Image (cartoon, grey):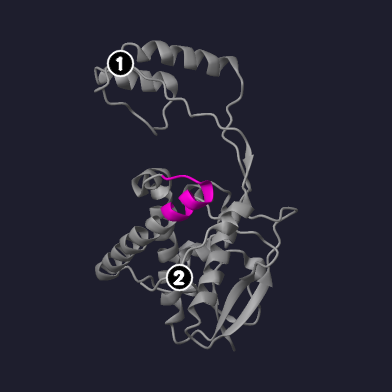
Amino acid sequence: MEKCLILTSNKKFWPKKNNLYYLGNWCLENIADSFKEKSKFKIISPNNNEKKLDINFNLTKKIYNNLIKDIAKELNKTLNKNFSTRFWEIIVGPWLREFIGFIIGKFDELENGLKNKSVNKILLANYSNIDINLVHTDDIANKNPQENDLYCFIIYSKIFEFLKKRKIKTVKVKIRYGKEKSLIPTEVDFIHPNSFTIYIKKTISKILNLFRKKSDPFIYGVKLKTFDLIKLYLKLNLVPQINIMPSYKRVKINKNVRNKLNFKKKKY
């Protein structure tokens, strides 16, 4: 009987009449009580030793330091600007560093799974009808679990195609994503509703800013209600600040501009 490596928690894709080997615990999240009976499933042990983590950390830094220079050069060329590399680091650096780490993590997980000598088959995604956009990993995590799993399934499949390290039988399942052609929405929309509440918050924020010193610290990114945030500021003997997310117009991703970006392949 064939022994197939599973890269997705979607049971509909799993081949029947195969011994299944799961890349991680997360593959079992749609099986009731699976975590109480993990011994019944063949789960690939992760390779999380300190040495490997250090290697991946240093590799992330090396790739980032090379890519950010190329990205800065290409963005300046494409947008007809002359901004410094440091400027582009501020704009895209946090996303790039996190995305590289995300890909290296998936790369390492898949390579570790393929080292299992029992596995002689792998389940992959046929994503030819799906448009994959580069996104922030927060965007992936904030999607529903099914969409998150599907995105990672496709990433694993793309990495396998890149690896081409081992002769192993492949079986591909065609991915369908509802009526959408794109896995991650191709529009950016951070527009706040034009509500009276937002207007009041903006007005209060402007007034409070008049009493704030430039050297005063501020609290950002905490998930507190406005009233609780104000109480926290007061406990810290600071002038309260009301953080309002900036508003952006809804825009469509310009794929023609993206296609013009030309990055040379490098070995690391």
Q: Which residue in the structure is indicated by mark 1?
A: 212
Q: Is residue 77 magenta?
A: yes
Q: Position of residue 235 (x, y in %)?
A: 26, 19
What predominant SS class does the magenta segment belong to? helix
Q: Where does residue 45 sit, x and y in percent of width and height?
A: 39, 73
Quadrant (top left/top right/bottom left/bottom right) for the N terminus? bottom right
Q: Nearer the viewer, mark 1 or mark 2?
A: 2
Query: Could you tell me residue 15's position as x and y percent?
Result: 64, 77
Percent from the top left, x then y, of residue 261? 53, 58
Crowding at mark 2 (Cα within 10 Å: few <14, some 14-19, many 20+): few
- Per the rendered image, the range of residues in magenta is 72-82
Residue 210 figure quarter:
top left
Q: Is residue 45 above or below residue 10?
A: below
**Magenta-colored stretch includes residue 26:** no
* Residue annotated with mark 2: 265
Disc 2 secondary structure class: loop
**Amino acid type indicated by mark 2:** Lys
Q: Which mark is residue 10?
A: none
Residue plotted at (49% across, 52% down): 77
Question: Which comes before the other along the chain, label 1 or label 2?
Answer: 1
Q: Is residue 126 above or below residue 150?
A: below
